[in-house]
Amino acid sequence: MTSSKKILDDLSLAVKNLPQHPVTKLDEVNTVLHILAVREEIERTRDDKYLEECQVLLAELEIHLKELQRKSDINSYRRVNY
């Protein structure tokens, strides 16, 4: 549950920063919601093949979220220093 809490905290933070970069933040919000949905699917599924597919998808979504957050951090740094 702590990872779900962290995701919800990230979602809250992304929503608070929405006016700065709306498209990037909406992509972050969408990705976080997809991560939550896939994690719920992983918890519910009993099919091994489907479970494996969900785990691959979850890994890809988490990488995408980290990339979005990295880009957001770079943009924030640029705004402050320029």
Image (cartoon, rainbow, N blue to C red):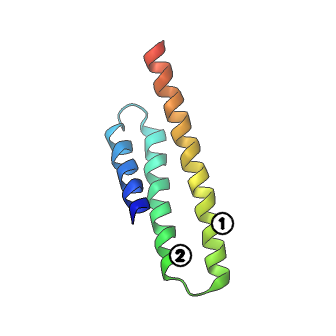
In the displayed structure, 4 sits above or below 65; it is: below
Residue 16 at what x, y percent from top left?
Answer: 31, 40
In the displayed structure, 25 sits above or below 35; it is: above
Residue 51 at what x, y percent from top left?
Answer: 61, 78
Q: Crowding near pointer 1: few (<14 within 10 Å), some, many (20+)?
A: few
Work out whether residue 58 or residue 20 is closer to the camera in this orientation and state it: 58
Work out whether residue 19 or residue 6 is closer to the camera in this orientation and state it: 6
Name the amino acid type tagged 1: Val
Q: Crowding near pointer 2: few (<14 within 10 Å), some, many (20+)?
A: some
Q: Which mark is residue 33?
A: none
Which residue is rendered at x = 63% and y = 80% of the image? 50
Callout 2: SS: helix
What residue would you read off at disc 1? 56
Separation of residues labelled 1 and 2 (CA atoms): 11 Å
Task: Name which quarter of the figure residue 80 lies in.
Answer: top left
Which residue is rendered at x = 57% and y = 54% of the image? 62
Task: Name which quarter of the figure residue 58 lies in.
Answer: bottom right
Would you say 75 lies left or right of 50 here? left
In the displayed structure, 1 sits above or below 6; it is: below
Which residue is rendered at x = 55% and y = 37% of the image? 70
Name the amino acid type tagged 2: Ile
Quarter of the picture containing the N terminus is bottom left
Q: Which mark is residue 42?
A: 2
Residue 8 at what x, y percent from top left?
Answer: 36, 55
Work out whether residue 31 or residue 42 is closer to the camera in this orientation and state it: 42
Number of marks: 2
Residue 25 at what x, y percent from top left?
Answer: 44, 42
Task: Tell which residue pokes out farthest to the bottom in this image.
Answer: 46
Callout 1: SS: helix
Work out whether residue 2 or residue 56 is closer to the camera in this orientation and state it: 2
Would you say 11 lies left or right of 73 here? left
